[in-house]
């Protein structure tokens, strides 16, 4: 592109450089938002699995034998204790005992929060895309002018 900008005035070169930097900044912000959306989707999937697990465990009889994961592909058999309380993460590395129904409610609320954050990130991503697309015609116009000289 350095050959292309030789036919431009110093002001046009400066404008082109600013536009390209702005587009680059928007693209970097869009990449961060995409990562945020991906992480949120994974979190949402985990929360959903937690809710379904609690609901399923709630329906099992006392002393039902279950397999407890102790690693990625390792399990130990265990008998289900009374399921009056479960330990639920509250955030910031803090966990507390809660009743099963209260834990499910907390997880449902967390799920809603994550969905809202994902939607907000998607909207911001759309806006960034619109900003990038709004700048492209001016960049193309300046480059066309440089090619025409």
Image (spheres, helix red, strand yellow):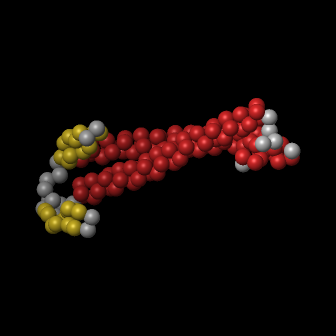
In the picture, the quarter occupied by the C terminus is top right
Task: Say which of 28 and 121 sits in front.
Answer: 28
Residue 44 locus on image (x, y percent): 40, 50
Residue 141 in view in this figure: no
Horizontal side of 71 relative to 41 (left or right) equals left
For residue 59, which quarter of the picture? bottom left
Horizontal side of 139 relative to 63 (left or right) equals right
Residue 96 locus on image (x, y percent): 20, 40
Q: How many marks?
A: 0
Residue 26 locus on image (x, y percent): 59, 40
The residue lying at 16 percent from left, 66 percent from top is 76
Q: Residue furthest top?
A: 11
The residue lying at 35 percent from left, 53 percent from top is 46
Horizontal side of 137 relative to 62 (left or right) equals right
The residue lying at 29 percent from left, 39 percent from top is 91
Residue 2 locus on image (x, y percent): 72, 46
For residue 106, which quarter of the picture? top left
For residue 142, which quarter of the picture? top right
Residue 106 in view in this figure: yes
Horizontal side of 40 relative to 56 (left or right) equals right
Task: Say which of 68 and 10 sits in front.
Answer: 10
Task: Say which of 30 and 77 sits in front.
Answer: 30
- Residue 47, compared with residue 13, is above or below; it is below
The residue lying at 23 percent from left, 55 percent from top is 58
């Amino acid at each position: 592109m350095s050959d292309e900008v030789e036919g431009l005035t110093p002001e046009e070169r400066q404008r082109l450089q600013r536009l390209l930097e702005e587009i680059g900044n928007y693209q970097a912000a869009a990449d961060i938002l995409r990562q945020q959306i991906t992480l949120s989707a994974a979190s949402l999937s985990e929360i959903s699995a937690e809710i379904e697990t609690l609901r399923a465990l709630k329906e099992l009889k006392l002393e039902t034998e279950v397999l407890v994961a102790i690693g990625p592909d390792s399990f130990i058999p265990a008998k289900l204790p009374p399921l009056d309380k479960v330990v639920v993460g509250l955030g910031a590395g803090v966990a507390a005992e809660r009743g099963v129904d209260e834990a499910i409610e907390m997880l449902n609320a967390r799920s809603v929060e994550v969905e809202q954050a994902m939607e907000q990130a998607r909207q911001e991503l759309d806006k960034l895309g619109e900003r990038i697309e709004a700048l492209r015609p001016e960049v193309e116009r300046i480059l066309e002018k440089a090619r025409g000289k």
